[in-house]
Amino acid sequence: MGIFLISTLYACQPQEVAESSTSPVATPVQKTAPTTDTRPIAFLDRQLSTNPAELPPLPYGYNALEKAIDAETMKLHHDRHHAAYVNNLNNALKKHTELQNRSVEALLRDLNSVPEDIRTTVRNNGGGHLNHTIFWQIMSPEGGGQPTGEIAQEINQTFGSFEEFRKQFNQAGGDRFGSGWVWLVRNPQGQLQIVSTPNQDSPIMEGSYPIMGNDVWEHAYYLRYQNRRADYLNNWWDVVNWTEINRRAQASQQNNS
Ligand SMILES: [Fe+2]
C-alpha cells in the first residue's frame, strides 16, 4: 500500500506550488548565504526596490514572442503571476516596514535575517519578483540564433559547444520536478554552471549570479504546450536575447566583495 501511494504521488501532474526538492544539478541552499555580495541582479544599474516593489513593464508587446510563447500566456504570466509576487511581497513587508530599506537582492541573500513570520513569503515572492524581472529582459522578439559576443566563447570553453550547452540546459529544465527554474549562473568560483532551483528560489541564495534562466512552471507554457515541457524548452531558444545575456555575463564577473 505504501509503495502504491508513493508511486501514485509521483505519477501526479506537477503542482504549481511544489515542495522544496532538489534536482541532480541543484545545489542545496546554504544555511548562511553570503551577505558581502552587493551586485544588482534584476537590473544591472540598481538593486530591486522593496519601497515599494513595482511590476516592471514588459519591454515588448504580449504577442512579441509568438515564435515561442503565445500572447495569452505572456499576458497572464506578467499581469497576473508576476504582479501577484509583487503584491504579496509588499503586503508581507507591511508587517516589518524596517525591511523596506533593503533591496530584494539583500533580503534573498540573507533570508535568515528576515523575521520568521514572513520569511517563506519573502523567499517565494521576492524570488518570484526577481526571477521574472530577469526573465522578461533576457528574451526578445529579435532573439534566438547562435550566441554572440564573449558569452559564446565562454559557453564553448565550458560546455564544449552551444549545442551541448543547450542540451544540458534543456535536460536540467526537464528534470526539475514540479515548478522551478533552470539557470546558467556564474558560481562563487567564477565558473559558468547550469543549475536548477525549485519554486521561486534564486541562485543568489547560493551565492551564484543568474546570467540567464528559463521558467519551467506550468504557467509559463501550459496554454500552448500543455504537458510538453520539452517542446517549450526547445522553442524558447528562438527568443533568447544574447545581447542582454552578454551584458549580464559581464556584470557577473564584477568583484562581488
Ligand atoms: Fe513564472
Image: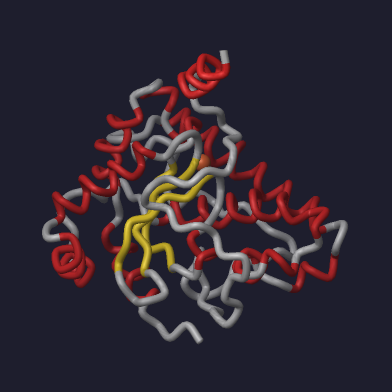
Residue 193: image x %, image y %? 32, 62
Residue 36: image x %, image y %? 58, 82
Residue 216: image x %, image y %? 43, 39
Q: Quadrant of residue 185?
A: bottom left
Measuring 51% from the left and 77% from the top, which residue is drawn there?
A: 39
Q: Exactly how many numbered labels are in the figure? A: 0
Q: Quadrant of residue 186?
A: bottom left
Task: Please state which of residues 207 and 220 is positioned toward the viewer in this rendering.
Answer: 207
Task: Please state which of residues 38 and 57 is positioned toward the viewer in this rendering.
Answer: 38
Which coloring applies here?
secondary structure
Residue 185 in the figure: left or right of residue 219: left
Measuring 44% from the left and 25% from the top, which residue is drawn there?
A: 222
Task: Please state which of residues 70 and 4 is positioned toward the viewer in this rendering.
Answer: 4
Above or below for 73 versus 48: above
Above or below for 42 versus 172: below
Residue 255: image x %, image y %? 43, 86
Residue 196 in the figure: left or right of residue 89: left
Above or below for 171 versus 256: above
Above or below for 143 versus 99: above
Residue 53 in the figure: left or right of residue 208: right
Quadrant, the N terminus? top right
Measuring 28% from the left and 35% from the top, which residue is drawn there?
A: 67
Residue 185 in the figure: left or right of residue 40: left
